[in-house]
Amino acid sequence: MVTLKDVAQRVGVSIRAVSHAVNHTGRLAPETREKILTAIHEMGYYPNQGARELVTRRSKLIGVLTPSLSISFYARIISGIQQVAHQENYTLLLMSPLGEKSADYQFLCTQMLQRRVDGIILNPIPSVRDIAKFTRSCGIPVIQIQNHIDSFGSDYVQVANSESAKEAVYALYRSGCRKIAMVSHSRVSEEIADRKRGFLAAMKEMMPDYTPVVMESRVGIPDARRVVGKMLAEHPEIDAIFAASDYAGLGAAQAALELGRRIPEDLSIIGFDNLEIAAQQLVYPLSTVDQPKEEIGRIAMKMMIDRLNGRRPISQVLPASLILRSTTKAIKKKKRGRK
């Protein structure tokens, strides 16, 4: 069995230096660290995790609680988390609940704590207030993604949801749309609430005398299709829809086509998230707000490592970018203004 001493003798450094390289601690010259890691790989040295925990009081295990492991949006964020975790020699414990109730998430948090995770990353989940409060009471760091409950003293990283929603409305307005509606989601989350606030603020700024139609659907294409079908039947004057997610945007497009609406001539649509399924539509690739999903994950994992090393909680808001595709009309070259 290969030991730290064997690796140290092979490279010609101290046992302490090898330990620093393995645990990503201390200061080592990059070339020295590289030589040590190469020797570790070639010699087949595997650190004893139990012994490491006794010394560092850390498991090097990070829990990631996510609504889904299959939906591409969450998977891309997890990919970013994994990149940094791998670089820093951490292991991820990924869990997704069968339901959406707070109790479902708390049950998984309990399982994570039983497995001695060093911290938990909340990959945007509903009922985040209850979960963050529960995990903080256990004395481990919590990183929030797309949620921001400042009073809990947790780090969070998110995109500028409200400002991004405003930009989407401004783009629809500049393309000539005036009767702009929104499809939001019935599931309570900070990110969706921020997008709704941004939408309403932009509509009040651009058209203060117009009361926009806002309807809610469950997350997913089928229910958005049903809700938008009802919306357009009751309000045929609507000429644009801002959707709180790409799934809602795709459902809106299906409903519009079923009612004989031309896209974008009769109805423009902008979604949110820039999912692959929305970008790859053959007939109507969806205009959308693009979130830097992998970057969000990388930042969240870096925040976790910094917290474990004693840094105080911080927040970071990333810009999102508007991508205009086939579901929106060309932007008119006019200054932003009211009708």
Image (tube, rainbow, N blue to C red):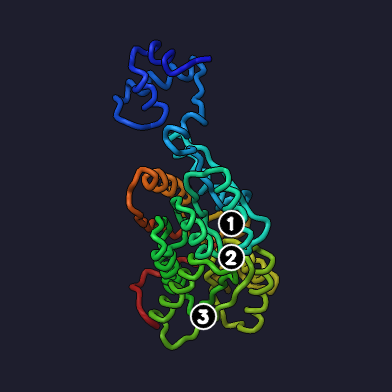
Q: In the drawing, what numbered circle is on residue 278?
A: 1
Residue identified by numbered label 3: 179
Q: Residues within 10 Å of mark 3 (few under 14, many from 20)?
A: many
Q: Are marks 1 and 2 in contact (CB under 8 Å)?
A: yes
Taking the image as drawn, is residue 265 in sight?
no
Tell me residue 188's x, y (percent).
55, 69
The crowding category of the residue bearing disc 1, from other C-alpha atoms within 10 Å (few below 14, some 14 to 19, many at least 20), is many
Three-letter amino acid code of the residue under disc 1 = Ala
Q: Secondary structure under badge 1?
A: helix
Disc 3 residue type (three-letter): Lys
The answer to which of marks 3 and 2 sits earlier in the sequence is 3
Closer to viewer: mark 3 or mark 2: 2
Question: Height in image: 286 above or below 31?
Answer: below
In the rendered structure, are the residues bearing label 1 and label 3 in contact, judged by CB atoms less than 8 Å apart? no
| Residue at (63, 71) in percent of width and height | 217
Q: Which label is found at residue 249?
A: 2
**Residue at left 48%, top 76%?**
177
Secondary structure at badge 2 equals: helix
| Sequence order check, earlier mark of 1 and 2 | 2
Q: Is residue 185 above or below residue 238?
A: above
